[in-house]
Image: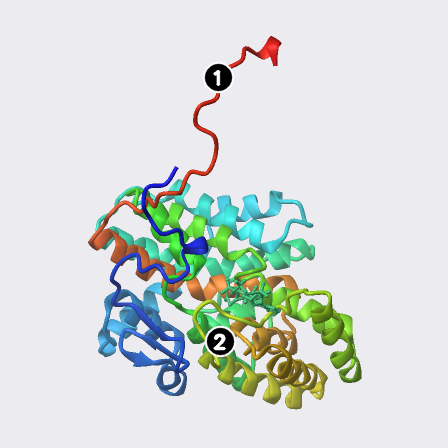
Amino acid sequence: MSRESVVSEGLKGVVIGKSEICFIDGKRGKLIYRGYDIHDLVKHSNFEEVVYLLWHGKLPVKKQFNDLYNNLVANRELSKGVISILKSFPKKATPMEVLRTAISALSLNDPDADDNSFEANIKKAIKLTAKTATVIASFDRIRKGKEPIEPNPNLNHAANFLYMLTGKIPNEMISRFFDICLILHADHELNASTFAARVTCSTLSDLYSAITSAVGTLKGPLHGGANIEVMKMLSDMGTVDKAKGYITARLAEKKRIMGFGHRVYKTEDPRATHLRRMSKEMGEKTGEIKWYEMSRVIEDIMMSEKGMYPNVDFYSASVYYAMGIPMDLYTPIFALSRVSGWIAHVLEQYSNNALIRPIAEYVGPIDLTYVPIDKR
Ligand code: ACO
């Protein structure tokens, strides 16, 4: 039934409110967090500082940075209860299912779980950001029949995650590259998972619920799940000489090539610029440059055949692969960083809340006569 409204499938182009957190200029390929260009943040900043920036709207002074940094370190450990929940999950559960369930479980013993004040939310924000990393790394150990590794307080968020995953302190290059990956993934305006977080908290539900919704939304292959699909595709090809035939055949079958296209960017995604460089450097470092080379071939074909650019998921796949990270952790790693952006948006939503509740154009019947069940 028409309500004289314009239908926008997938909310394409619909502006649902004002935000001061993240600006994407899709035509010029610019990404800005709280006024700072992503290229400057990659060059000068680190993940913890970006977290402060996203949550508080400005860069921290030293004391503010140290307080947040130390609080994140102090909140990394999981309770025995959460560890035993992780141990009770099927070893074959996907890490995203596990993360979604564990994030939800984290609220059960938090006395602040239902307190929506800014102060309580910052406390929960620190716990969620710190513990997301520990949940992902711990489950990976547990499913391999190993004990989780205690967090290392001498390492930053990025290096500590890799340490908890492998038991080895990563070298400086890998630590910094992973830190950059976290900076690049931290926020991206009203992407599907962030929108899901905002919808959830707009009912005045709590932060844990909002982040649980967001994790479930990120999981899909059209969103954060694309990086796994990219690596599966590269592995399927196996060698650089197969790349062209593989992509051309898929395009002829009208299949989507994962890691390409974007709802907002119509030029190079500025995150892909950094990830491409890191993919190359990691490939050179590990002696396995073929994943980068294959990716370059695919990029050229996608440009000439479809005029499409790679998105953040395309080169992050080969970067994580070169770091030795298991493929099914790529999307959880996205969450490990994006949790900071989700939280920033939830804080902003609470600060000026309006229930998010769009309308649909009803196209079904309206005047059917009810027939009792035994007469149908
Ligand atoms: N490969 C081939 N064709 C594509 C691709 C792709 N990756 N992406 C879009 N197209 C085509 C579509 O088939 C469609 O063609 P048609 O008009 O002939 O039917 C056209 O481009 C427009 O596609 P839409 O899905 O309408 O564009 P939308 O803006 O809704 O989609 C999306 C954006 C979902 C990212 C899409 O480009 C896609 O599916 N990409 C692959 C998955 C992916 O990489 N997701 C990660 C995105 S980044 C992130 O979430 C972190």
Q: Disc 1 marks which residue?
A: 369
Q: In percent of the image, x 35 and y 86: which residue is there?
A: 40
How packed mark 2 is, by other alpha carbons closer than 10 Å (few <14, some 14-19, many 20 or more), is: many
Q: In percent of the image, x 43 and y 27: which residue is there?
A: 366
Q: Disc 2 marks which residue?
A: 181
Mark 1, ligand 1, within 8 Å: the answer is no
In the rendered image, residue 47, in percent from the top left (x then y), is placed at 39, 74
Q: Which quadrant is home to the N terminus?
A: top left
Q: Nearer the viewer, residue 354 or 153?
A: 354
Q: In percent of the image, x 56 and y 84: which residue is there?
A: 276
Q: In percent of the image, x 58 and y 71: which residue is there?
A: 259
2 vs 1, front mark: 1
In the rendered image, residue 115, in percent from the top left (x then y), is placed at 26, 44
Mark 2, ligand 1, within 8 Å: the answer is no
Residue 76 can be seen in this image = no
Q: Which quadrant is home to the C terminus?
A: top right
Q: Type of residue at label 2? A: Cys
- Quadrant position of residue 18: bottom left
How packed mark 1 is, by other alpha carbons closer than 10 Å (few <14, some 14-19, many 20 or more), is: few
